[in-house]
Image (cartoon, grey):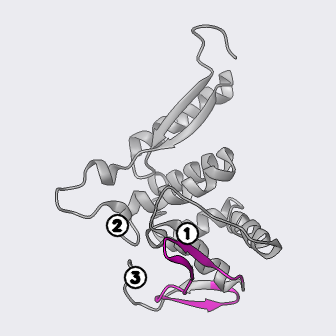
Amino acid sequence: MGQPGVVTTVDFHFDVMCPYAYQTSIWMREVRDLVGVEVRWRFFSLEEVNRAKGKKHPWEREWSYGWSMMRIGALLRRSDMDALDRWYEGAGRALHIEGRKPHERSVAREILADLGLEQSGLERLIELAREGPTAVMCAETLWWRCHRRLLADALLAAGCEVHHLLEGGPRPHELHPSARVEDGRPVYDAGTRPRLDPR
């Protein structure tokens, strides 16, 4: 606990797509390193804030610019705030300094691999699933509109048995129609439109 009136923790809200947030995050890291404040990285969505009336919410699309990168960050934050920090710094630098496109799947994967974050959490999840029954939960009720769809595909491709616990009872997971399995991993290149409703 810090002294009265002394800031020891900062909640920093960002969208990877925002250049102003990225520049401020550079300064915030410098402040953290100089005075030892704890930075808790939080999210906001420019896509949602600026969404035109009648347009889809970013989470209703298979892939969206800032929202999809936010999902990657949220998954990382669940296990390690430092991993989220490194992801944001890497993705922000790629977009705003290097001119790359981290909102594209292939570039996002490259950044994760460069940071040593690729599959580490997934590999742990596969290990847990092989050891015994394992549950993955999220605030998003509909699993097919959530990162759980991708996790379920990855687990299925790795040879794990996957079921979705629904109101009518468990339902076996089926691989996404645009995916195929290669070397124990799902590859999404079949070119079909995603099925948003599994019914």
Residue at 38% across / 77% down in the picture?
Answer: 196
Number of marks drawn? 3
Q: Position of residue 107 (x, y in %)?
A: 53, 69
Callout 1: SS? helix
Where, quadrant-wise, is the N terminus in this rendering? top right
Q: Residue 148, labelled with which disc?
A: 1
SS for tag 3? loop
Q: Nearer the viewer, residue 102 or 183?
A: 183
Using the rendered view, name the quadrant where residue 62 is placed. Answer: bottom left
Return the mark for residue 60. 2
At which x and y percent is residue 53? 16, 56
Amino acid type at circle 2 is Glu
- Give the x, y percent position of residue 63: 41, 70
Report which residue position mark 3 lands on: 194
Q: How far apart in space, not on screen, are marks 3 and 2 (Cα)?
A: 11 Å
Q: Is residue 163 above or below residue 34?
A: below
Q: How far separated are the C-alphas under marks 3 and 1?
A: 14 Å
The mark nearer the N terminus, 3 or 1, is 1
State yes or no: residue 184 in magenta: yes
**Is the residue marked by circle 1 packed among few (<14), some (14-19), or many (20+) residues within 10 Å?**
some
For mark 3, does the 10 Å Cα neighbourhood hold few (<14), some (14 to 19), or many (20 or more) residues?
Answer: few
Residue 42 placement (x, y as % from top left)? 51, 41
The numbered mark, 3 or 2, whose residue comes first in the sequence reads: 2
Determine the secondary structure under disc 2: helix
Gap in angstroms between the C-alphas marked 1 and 2: 14 Å
- The one nearer the camera, 94 or 76, is 76
Quadrant containing the C terminus is bottom left
Under mark 3, the amino acid is: Pro
